[in-house]
Amino acid sequence: MDKWQRRTVFYSLLLIGVMLIYAVLYHHGMRIYEGENLTFLHSLQVVVETFTTTGFGSDAPWDSPEMNALVIVMDLTGVALIFMALPVLAFPLLGEVLSTTVPKSVDNGVDDHVVICSYTPRAEALIAELGSWDVDYVIVEPDRDRATELYEDDYRVIHEDPESVAGLEQAGLTAARALVADVSDQVDASIVLTAQEVAEDVPIISVVEEPDRRAYHRLAGADEVLSPRPILGESLASKVTTSVTADLGEAVEIGDDFEIAELPIHRGSRLVGRTLANSGIREQAGVNVIGAWFRGEFETPPSPDATLTNGTVLLVTGREDQLEQLKKLTLSEVRRFDRGNTVVIGYGQVGRTITSAFDEAGLPYTVVDQTEVEGVDVVGDAIEPDTLQEAGIDSARSAILALPDDTTAEFATLVIRDVSPQTEIIARAEETESVQKMYRAGADYVLSLATVSGRMIASTILEDEDVLSLDQQVEVVRTHAPKLVGQTLGEALVRSKTGCTVVGVERDGTVITDVGPDLRVESDDELVIAGTDDGIRRFNEQMT
């Protein structure tokens, strides 16, 4: 019984009780003070007429002051009960009628869908990936208000408890393609156990915050246990560890001696301030620049007149030696051999992964966190200039923001940029939509946990998509494109329609890297595509 139903029952019992009491008083009052013997039913009728303000019939007027006083009290009580009914019953009932009703189960016939338990910012990237492949999903959300918001925003959601058997049954788990649990480590384990009870044969993907808890999720029955935070931490750390040497770092191998890589231009690089056409990149390194990030905005192909700045991230293809030559050009001329201090702000799972990578590389660092634990050098608030100055931000080569709260990270970016304009800022974002704000705040490189998590889960669930780059700003996938069969790449207009670039074609076990507009796509070809997450989704929608 819900709250409104309980109110209705209580009010009805109160109304009946008050009316019966007044009927008894009226019945005896008429006999004692007016000398009239009425039936109890007649007395009850008078009370009803009084409460409903329809009149008093033949009994009016009354001669005794006692009966007149009783009638006055009945009048006031009736009016009070009417006005009490408005906020207690009428208004809630009207609100219930006009409010959005979230479904409690999926529609009949829905199958081969992905059950997502429950909605988090990290689920957004996964939902977008599923949508591009025309894969249905349903979100199981236990919070009524949150479920209502999602439903009004056109998400496929049901209001159920993902930890209950009934909730997963209502989500159609027995006919689902997979289940994704991404709430918290303990809740996810509970969801996995429940899913095993409902449908043992459905693949279960669990996302853990702490990598050392993977074993418990596998014991619970999870088929895949993913931990995106260490990957995010390693990627952010690599932006520092590879910035002091010409080592290429994390490039994506497309074929024999042919790779694709993201290379950020560091502060003090000889490329800063030059246009792409006058940079000499092609002449000195021999690579192909197929795209570039300018302050968080991706351009493909980038304009030859585009000015390269610190923080510009080039997306390039070429041989390993060519990419390494370009890497030398992107490094700071002043600080190429400077292994200066890095300030790591935030000492959670991502922060600890970053410091572990620095320990392996032998790089100095200072850790800032609000909690005094082993490994933290400066205890304080990262948005306070005094805390940052105590950590040595004035002389730091770079700062990595590994904070779980995007609002705090954005403000910390503003403070660092004001206190130490020359420091390179590398930031972790929780949500994808926060990436642009961090770039505007002054960050040089930003990667979101939602992006890494969404790609990891999608790569596990989607059989036709092989994600090659989990921790890059640009997504690189290997996929079939049946709608392009028989067309040349020039005829297909892949780049103009989707914003993606075909960087390779795998045919008969061989990867073709000399991809030109005259290359005709054959039925068994697998295309290697590079582009933003949105661009890859457009490619899947239009070309696959």
Image: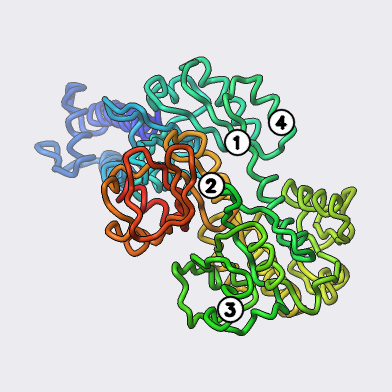
Closer to us: mark 3 or mark 4? 3
* Disc 3 to disc 4, C-alpha distance: 43 Å
Q: Which residue is mark 2?
A: 122
Residue type at mark 3? Leu
- Give how far apart the Cα atoms at labels 4 and 1 are: 10 Å
Which residue matches tag 4? 213
User: SS at mark 4?
Assistant: helix
Looking at marks 3 and 2 on the same chain, the residue that comes earlier in the sequence is marked by 2
Instruction: Kindly state the secondary structure of the residue where label 3 is placed.
Output: loop
Q: Disc 3 versus disc 1: distance between alpha carbons?
A: 38 Å
- Can you identify the residue that label 1 sits on? 207
Res. 129 visible in picture: yes
Q: Which residue is mark 3?
A: 308
The answer for how far apart the CA atoms under marks 3 and 2 are is 31 Å
Q: Are marks 1 and 2 in contact (CB under 8 Å)?
A: yes
Q: Is residue 246 left or right of residue 173?
A: right
